[in-house]
Amino acid sequence: MSERILVLVRHGQSEWNLKNLFTGWRDPDLTEQGVAEAKRAGARLKAEGLTFDVAFTSALTRAQKTLDLVLGEMGQQGVKTFRNQALNERDYGDLSGLNKDDARAKWGEEQVHLWRRSYDVPPPGGESLRDTVARTLPYYVQEILPAVLRGQHTIVTAHGNSLRALIMVLEKLSPEGIMKRELATGAPIVYRLAADSTVESKRDLVAAA
Ligand SMILES: O=C(O)[C@@H](CO)OP(=O)(O)O
């Protein structure tokens, strides 16, 4: 039985990350730095000797391009890929497109932090992390996890908060625990799962600067 490998990668820096705008379901492209981060992630995964059998990504350009660049760097362009909006970023609702510093000036540091990192406080008109878990988890359980348990080496490229949703479940984090969890762009996390789908080991492959 081959190993049960699941790799999660947040997309490389996007144009709106650079401009400090709430992004959510909006669809900006990667910046030059984001492209470099994605390639570096691919190089790190290749250096680990990893190969992939199946890939999952969101319906958004930044995550799809990141996947293409990672696989390209690994010489693995042909990997079967599934794209689904279940893996999209948390919907930021009315905050989408606003500048994060302007939002802090308007609503206060604490309120904006709760919208960005709390488990259950939804931004106006958008999804809380709990809502995002409710959207991503069925897709994980029905599509991603079965592939991993079959022994298919699996990569998921997605977004800061859609991945925090999956990480909360994988790492059994509390609402307080997930509040402190930040994901760097283009930094792969390699999980090995046990046959009962719990996490056996985890490694952060921080992309070299
Ligand atoms: O704007 C967004 O969609 C996300 C990810 O970039 O931002 P935040 O870190 O505020 O959740």
Image (cartoon, grey):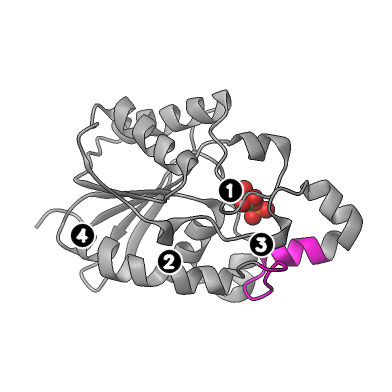
Q: Residue at x 23, y 32 (%)?
A: 76
Secondary element type, mark 1: loop
Between marks 3 and 1, how big is the CA–CA gap?
A: 10 Å
Q: Position of residue 130 (x, y in %)?
A: 56, 74
Q: Which of pointers 4 and 2 lies earlier in the amino acid sequence?
A: 2
Is the residue 120 above or below the residue 14 in the image? below
The residue labelled by disc 1 is 26
The residue labelled by disc 2 is 136
- Label drawn at residue 147: 4
Near-viewer residue (39 or 134): 134
Do residues under tags 1 and 2 come within 8 Å of each other at their CB atoms? no
Between marks 2 and 3, how big is the CA–CA gap?
A: 17 Å
Q: Which of pointers 3 and 1 lies earlier in the amino acid sequence?
A: 1
Q: Position of residue 139 (x, y in %)?
A: 34, 66
Q: Position of residue 65 (x, y in %)?
A: 42, 35
The amino acid pointed to by label 4 is Ala
Q: Which quadrant is the C terminus positioned in?
A: top right
The amino acid pointed to by label 3 is Gly
Q: Which quadrant is the N terminus positioned in?
A: bottom left
